[in-house]
């Protein structure tokens, strides 16, 4: 007999939880605008799997493998390759840029403890 009351109480609680005032779809949902930009890739700017993307003011920086590419943010057109990994004076250690919006330059780490600067046209700046 006790199990019967327990089941009945559980059923009443379940029914009470399922009823209520329905919300209108305008109140319950939010809208997110999604913008899709098709990137122009050629033989000189192929993007591999799992790229890292950095959205800048007017460009999109894409890091893929050991390369960093710049694309136009509006059209997706390939602009330039930025620097290269290596040991020469203009090279960086890894293609993971940080953007400085004050001077508009991309900074790359150069081991052991220096930075390499490049502008938005891919030119070396020190």
Image (cartoon, rainbow, N blue to C red):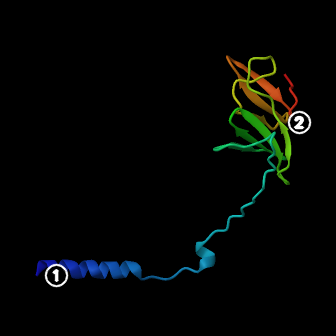
Q: Pick out the residue farthest to the front.
A: 43
Q: Quadrant of the C terminus?
A: top right
Classify 15 as above or below 60. Answer: below
Q: Position of residue 53 (x, y in %)?
A: 71, 44
User: Which residue in the structure is indicated by mark 1?
Assistant: 4
Q: Callout 2: helix, strand or loop?
A: loop
Local crowd size for mark 2, using a 10 Å CA cut-off: few (<14), some (14–19), many (≥20): few
Task: Report which quarter residue 54 is drawn in.
Answer: top right
Discs 1/2, front: 2
Name the residue at 12% across, 78% down. 2
User: Which residue in the structure is indicated by mark 2?
Assistant: 121
Of 15 and 97, the residue lying toward us = 97
Q: CA distance from mark 1 to mark 2?
A: 77 Å
Of 46 and 1, the residue lying toward us = 46
Name the residue at 36% across, 81% down. 16
Task: Report which quarter residue 32 is drawn in.
Answer: bottom right
Name the residue at 84% across, 36% down. 104
In the shown orientation, is residue 2 left or right of residue 40?
left
Q: Pick out the residue farthest to the left.
A: 1
Q: Quadrant of the N terminus?
A: bottom left
Q: Position of residue 45 (x, y in %)?
A: 79, 41
Classify 74 as above or below 113. Answer: below
Q: Callout 1: helix, strand or loop?
A: helix
Local crowd size for mark 1, using a 10 Å CA cut-off: few (<14), some (14–19), many (≥20): few
In this rendering, the count of numbered labels is 2
Q: Position of residue 103 (x, y in %)?
A: 85, 33
Q: Position of residue 18 (x, y in %)?
A: 40, 80
In the shown orientation, is residue 119 left or right of residue 27?
right
Name the residue at 31% across, 78% down. 13
Classify 4 as above or below 85. Answer: below
N-terminal-most mark, 1 or 2: 1
């Amino acid at each position: 007999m006790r199990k019967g009351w327990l089941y009945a109480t559980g059923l009443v609680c379940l029914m009470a939880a399922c009823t209520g005032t329905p919300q209108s779809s305008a109140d319950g949902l939010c809208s997110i605008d999604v913008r899709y930009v098709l990137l122009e890739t050629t033989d000189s700017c192929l993007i591999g799997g799992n790229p890292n993307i950095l959205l800048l003011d007017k460009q999109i920086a894409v890091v893929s493998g050991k390369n960093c590419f710049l694309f136009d943010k509006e059209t997706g057109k390939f602009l330039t390759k930025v620097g290269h990994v290596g040991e020469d004076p203009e090279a960086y250690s890894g293609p993971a840029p940080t953007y400085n919006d004050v001077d508009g330059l991309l900074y790359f780490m150069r081991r052991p403890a220096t930075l390499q600067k490049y502008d938005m046209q891919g030119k070396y700046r020190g």
